[in-house]
Amino acid sequence: MFDVAVIGAGIAGLTVAQQLHQAGYKVVVVDKSRGVGGRVATRRLQGTCADHGLRYLEPQGQLTEKFIDVLRVKQSDFEGNWGIVQAWTDTICGESAKPNSSSIRPRYVAPMGMNAIAKFLATGLEMRLNQRVQEITPTDEKTWHFTFEPKADPLIAKAVVVAIPAPQALMLLEPLAKTIPTQFLDSLRAVEFDPCLSVMAGYPASRQQDLSNAETVNFPLHLDVTQDSDLAWIGLDSSKRPNPQIPVFVLHSTAEFANRYLDAEDLNPAASQMLSRAAQLLVPWLDSPEWFQIHRWRYAFPSRPLHQDWLDAGTPLPLICCGDWCGGNLVEGAMNSGLAAAVKINQQMEMRSLPGESFLEALQQISGRSDR
């Protein structure tokens, strides 16, 4: 039996799990995906990788500043002289191909893929991946019982943290309507998300020289598109990698565009349309990739977040929701929500001493020992 089960291995879930784990609680993290990170996602494909979720990491507040500092020092498990993240660019251009003065700030990326930062947060945690929670039910023994689809080993926990998008949390928790206050479920219903489609596209190695020539004349290779109905982002993702062999671009759609294809069985027409629009905005050959893949983020960005760091079910058995939809839609918000949820769970359990923001330094030491 576990003290705490965390549903969701995104930034918020891993943060709350680390807080409680470092305080001595027996914690398990459960996620339906094959890997950790949630929308901090990297796909391995065609001998390279592409970040189809979080584009980059930037200082958004005290917590992300400290997180970046730790990640820059922590050496990667791969060969090379870099931390998990390194500086990428301080300039992102708009449609005019000119940077706005307000956009000049450092951005950091993980050379081996952005999900490396989530893997770092997961260090030392017990994980159950590829397991979708179908149902949680309270037992007579004052614990929570988990049912999985497909069937998996049973899981029992004294407390639960639900760290997934609010609409998914609602689907999981609505069957407990007789146990959970109506106000709690109404709060989940009030949270809204914008969707996004993400296209990853690879091009012939010969196009590398075209891009090198473009850089010499300060031609933009990353566009933060703000006035287009189809595209929100065009980025040369392969520029994050050491010695890239082929150009790889990642495109993000607008919410308006994604909504048109949200339930489509075949997303390839949407990908083709996004690539055609990117060719119009940046370089003409972007509409002719050697390969491409498209991913649908149904819950990409909280458009109507909850204006508090956590949501307490108020049940006799501890049950807390957290995520980037609590208080905002940024990495800073997700981490702060995880910290706050850990405090709330701890108050309902054994009132142990929690590490707070210092959990990052402790994690760095733990991870450093595991590398040797």
Image: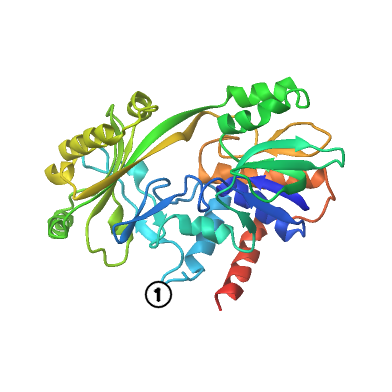
Residue beneath the point at 20% across and 34% down: 277
Report which quarter residue 169 is drawn in: top right
- Rate crowding at label 1 as few (under 14), some (14 to 19) or many (20 or more) other CA atoms within 10 Å: few
Percent across and percent down for residue 125 are: 64, 59
Which residue is nearer to you in this view: 121 or 167?
Answer: 167
Q: Which residue is mark 1?
A: 79
Query: Which element type, helix, strand or loop, lies under badge 1?
Result: loop
Which residue is nearer to you in this view: 312 or 146?
Answer: 146
Can residue 95 be seen here? The reply is: no
Percent across and percent down for residue 145 are: 75, 42
Percent across and percent down for residue 264 are: 35, 28
Can residue 126 be seen here? The reply is: yes
Figure label count: 1
Which residue reaches farthest right?
141
Q: Is residue 56 above or below residue 257?
A: below
Percent across and percent down for residue 62 are: 57, 51
Q: Is residue 23 above or below residue 280?
A: below
Report which quarter residue 176 is drawn in: top right
Which residue reaches farthest bottom?
372
Please state, as top left, top right, bottom left or bottom right, where the C terminus lies in the image.
bottom right
Residue 192 is left or right of residue 17, and the answer is left
Residue beneath the point at 40% across and 58% down: 113
Residue 229 is left or right of residue 356, and the answer is left
Disc 1 residue type?
Answer: Glu
Report which quarter residue 173 is drawn in: top right
